[in-house]
């Protein structure tokens, strides 16, 4: 009976140590997320990088972009918009500590229809958001 108790105790202690080590490692792994669709979205990160693309229907030939970031420890937030003919008509980046932390821009003229919006976060710490509006 005593050896069974000792064996189970050792196994349980081992499992608890393994779980605590695993959970600590997860906190150190950079994570980023892009929650976007249509004409707006939010981004968050703790040092990681990612790229996400979605489509947006624009019935006009131009679009207005509003974007902002809140961060104190680095990284960049880029948005590239291509029109229905796959021509790049807008490419803007906010970089922490360089210039303003928000912007409003009007795109170049493009072909209306299904536009592609690509969001790239690089070593991003903090959060941000964007909104696209049809026309300028």
Image (cartoon, grey):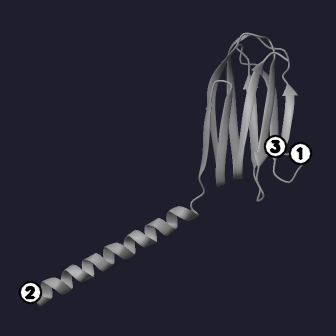
Dot 2 corresponds to which residue? 1
Select label 1 or label 3 by which is in front: 1
Could you give the CA–CA distance between mark 1 and mark 3, rounded to whole angstroms?
Answer: 7 Å
Question: Disc 3 or disc 2, which is closer to the eye?
Answer: 2
Q: Tell me, yes or no, if residue 124 can be seen here.
A: no
Vertical placement of 63 versus 112: above or below? below
**Badge 3: how crowded within 10 Å, few (<14), some, or many (20+)?**
many
* Label 3: which secondary element: strand
108 and 1: which one is in front?
Answer: 1
Q: Residue 65: x percent and y percent? A: 80, 28
Q: Is residue 43 left or right of residue 77?
A: left
In this picture, is 92 found above or below 132? below
Structural distance between the alpha carbons of marks 1 and 2: 69 Å
Callouts 3 and 2 close, C-beta under 8 Å: no
Rendering coords of residue 1 (x, y %): 9, 86
- Please tell me the numbered disc located at residue 100: 1
Residue 93 appears in the rendering: yes
Which sits earlier in the primary sequence, circle 3 or circle 2?
2
Q: Position of residue 59 (x, y in %)?
A: 72, 10
User: Where's the C terminus, which quadrant?
Assistant: top right
């Amino acid at each position: 009976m005593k050896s069974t108790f000792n064996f189970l105790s050792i196994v349980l202690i081992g499992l608890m140590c393994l779980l605590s080590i695993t959970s600590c490692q997860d906190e150190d792994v950079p994570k980023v997320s892009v929650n976007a669709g249509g004409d707006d979205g939010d981004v968050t990160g703790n040092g990681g990088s990612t790229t996400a693309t979605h489509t947006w229907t624009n019935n006009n030939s131009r679009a207005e972009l509003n974007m902002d970031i809140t961060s104190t420890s680095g990284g960049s937030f880029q948005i590239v918009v291509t029109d229905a003919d796959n021509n790049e008509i807008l490419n803007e980046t906010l970089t922490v500590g360089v210039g303003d932390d928000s912007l409003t821009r009007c795109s170049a003229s493009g072909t209306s229809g299904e536009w592609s919006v690509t969001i790239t976060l690089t070593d991003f710490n903090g959060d941000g958001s964007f909104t696209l509006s049809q026309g300028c």
